Image: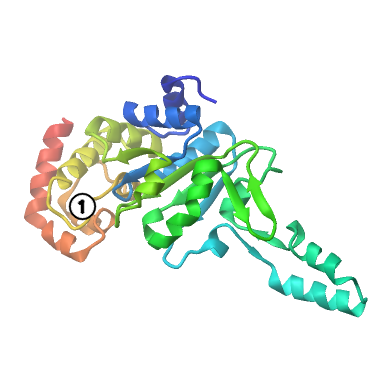
Amino acid sequence: MPASIDEVGQALASQDYVADRRLATVVYLALKLGRPLFLEGEPGTGKTEIARTLAAALGRPLIRLQCHEGLDLAGAAYEWNYARQMLEIRLAEAAAEDRAALAARLFTDAFLVKRALLDAIDPLRPVPPVLLIDELDRADEPFEAFLLEVLADFQITIPEMGTVKAITPPIVVLTSNRTREVHDAVKRRCLYHWVGFPDAARELEIIRRRVPGASERLAREIVAFVQRLREIELHKLPGVAETIEWTRALRELDTVVLDPEVVQNTLGLLLKYQDDIARVGADEVARLIEQARTAAS
C-alpha cells in the first residue's frame, strides 16, 4: 500500500495514469482511512480508469458493478438459485427426507448466487479486490439504499442466512457523471472528489504516455486544439478519452500536423452530437487550428 501521496502518484503513473496532486491526495486518504472514494465529473475524464489503475498498481482483482436503470439487489448483491432449490426439494421428497433438514440446507452458500457487491466482501477471498461501482447516477434512486450497508460497514445482511462481512475491506470506487444528484447518505459514507478536465500540461503528458507513437508536434497541437474546443458552448465537451482516441486515429492516418480537412473529417471522434459538429464548422476549425499551432510552437 502506498505510504505517501507521492507514492500514490508514482503508483498511478506506473500504469500511465497522470493524476494531479488533489486527486492523488484523496486517493491516498481513501486508502489510508479505508473509506470508499466517490468520483464525480464529466464523462471521459478518467474516473473509471482510476479503479482499473489502482487494481493493476496494487495487484488486486477488479470487480465492476455497472449501474443501469432497473438495477436491483438481485443484480447487484445476490439472489437465490431457485431452479436448483426446486430440484433439491424434489430429490428430498423422493427420498422422504426430513423437512427441517431440507429447509436448513436450502439457504446456504450452495444455493447462493453472488453478484458483484457480495463477491467483493466475500470473507473467503485471499486478496481484497478493488470494487468499482460505475456510473451510479444511471441507477434508480432507491437502489442507492442497497449500498449504504456496504459502504459503511463492508457487509451485507441476508435475511435467510445472516450477515456477510469482509475480513479485510475492499477498496471501493464509485463514479457518477452527474446526470442526477446522488443522495447525501451515499456521499457521507465516501470521500468525494470532482474530476475535471485536465489542464494542457497534464493532458499533454497523458497523450505522451497513452499514445507514445504520436509525434511531439502533433500531440501539442491536438491538446491545444481540444483545450480551445472546450471553451466553446457545446452540448457535450470532449473528455480525455476522446482526446486519446482522436490522437490514435490521427496517428493511424499518418497525420503529422493538424490539417483542416482531416480535422473536419474526424470531428466525430471528439464530438458525439450532430448539433455540436455543425456548431464547429469549417471557419471555426480553421480558427482553432491556427490558435493550436501558435500555442504548440
Give the residue displayed 44% in from the left and 24% down from the top: 10
Q: How is the image coloured?
A: rainbow
Q: Residue furthest front?
A: 100
Does residue 213 show up?
Answer: no
Q: Where is residue 51 in the image (x, y as percent from the top left)?
A: 47, 41
Q: Where is residue 269 in the image (x, y as percent from the top left)?
A: 29, 55
- Asked if residue 170 lies left or right of residue 208, the reply is right
Query: Residue 114: which quarter of the image?
Result: bottom right
Considering depth in this image, is 125 or 277 the residue closer to the camera? 125
Considering depth in this image, is 12 or 219 the residue closer to the camera? 12
**Mark 1: amino acid:** Val
Query: Residue 276: which quarter of the image?
Result: bottom left
Does residue 223 show up?
Answer: yes
Q: Residue furthest right?
A: 95
- Find numbered disc 1 in the image and state the secondary structure of the residue it sits on: helix
Which quadrant is home to the C terminus? top left
Q: Mark 1 points at which residue?
A: 263
- Asked if residue 162 lies left or right of residue 63, the reply is right
Which quadrant is home to the N terminus? top right
Give the residue displayed 8% in from the left and 46% down from the top: 287
- The tally of labels here is 1
Q: Where is residue 121 in the image (x, y as percent from the top left)?
A: 61, 45
> Against 255, is 276 above or below?
below
Q: Where is residue 63 in the image (x, y as percent from the top left)?
A: 56, 48
Give the residue displayed 47% in from the left and 33% down from the top: 15
Considering depth in this image, is 1 or 19 the residue closer to the camera? 1
Mark 1, Cα crowd under 10 Å, few <14 / some 14-19 / many 20+, is some
